Image (cartoon, helix red, strand yellow):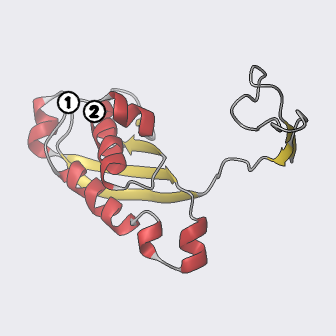
Amino acid sequence: MFARHQSASGPTAGRGVRSEHTGAESVRPVRPARRDVIRLMGISAVGHHGVFEAEKREGQPFAVDVVMHVDVAEAAATDDLTKTVNYAEVGDLVAGFIMGEPFDLIETLADRIAGTILQTQPLAGTVEVTVHKPQAPLPHEFHDVQVTVVRDRADLEASR
């Protein structure tokens, strides 16, 4: 894929340069954004999250799915764990949140997990966290209640 670079005021300003000597436009290949993904699906534990006292007292099963967008090219080329996300650490973090401090809302649980992953895994660019609450206290037959949050580095910086 190639993109034609235009003048400094054009739509691709800042991505290319006009030759100082000839004034000619340059044509350079544009590398698409990485779409590498690491998924941890179904991390499960008993937690005490919910708005009702019985939920906090008795607990119930929760499951969490985590999707992390990470450029894994260098890790793959070097076979070096330090060049990627450590998904064992992420799994431990998620289980700790499920079993830890109770929150009224699973929205809060998902948000805290996502923010902490971004803080502790600097190579994760975007994180998607889905919290499943299959035994939510609903008066209807259902399969699952899920909340998904998506957070990225800009969200992390904005919260500081």
Compared to residue 135, the image places residue 65 above or below, namely below
Instruction: Name which residue lies at 86% across and 41% down.
Output: 26
Residue 121 place in picture, x, y as percent? 36, 56
Q: Is residue 101 left or right of residue 76?
A: left
Compared to residue 141, the image places residue 122 above or below, namely below
Evaluate whether residue 62 shows in this view: yes
Q: Amino acid at mark 1?
A: Asp
Q: Amino acid at mark 2?
A: Thr
Instruction: Name which residue lies at 47% across and 68% down.
Output: 83
What is the residue that sits farthest to the top in this orientation? 9
Instruction: Name which residue lies at 57% across and 58% down.
Output: 71
Residue 133 place in picture, x, y as percent? 34, 41
- Viewer-nearest of discs 2 and 1: 2
Residue 17 place in picture, x, y as percent? 77, 37
Q: Is residue 154 left or right of residue 120?
A: right
Q: Are marks 2 and 1 in contact (CB under 8 Å)?
A: yes
Compared to residue 150, the image places residue 32 above or below, namely below
Residue 101 place in picture, x, y as percent? 13, 43
**Residue assigned mark 2:** 108
SS for dot 2? helix
Compared to residue 8, the image places residue 81 above or below, namely below
Q: Nearer the viewer, residue 50 or 103?
A: 103
**Residue assigned mark 1:** 104
Neighbor class of circle 2 (other Cα within 10 Å; few <14, some 14-19, many 20+) is some
Q: Nearer the viewer, residue 114 or 7?
A: 7
Residue 143 placement: quadrant = top left
Instruction: Quote the CA–CA distance across marks 2 and 1.
Output: 8 Å
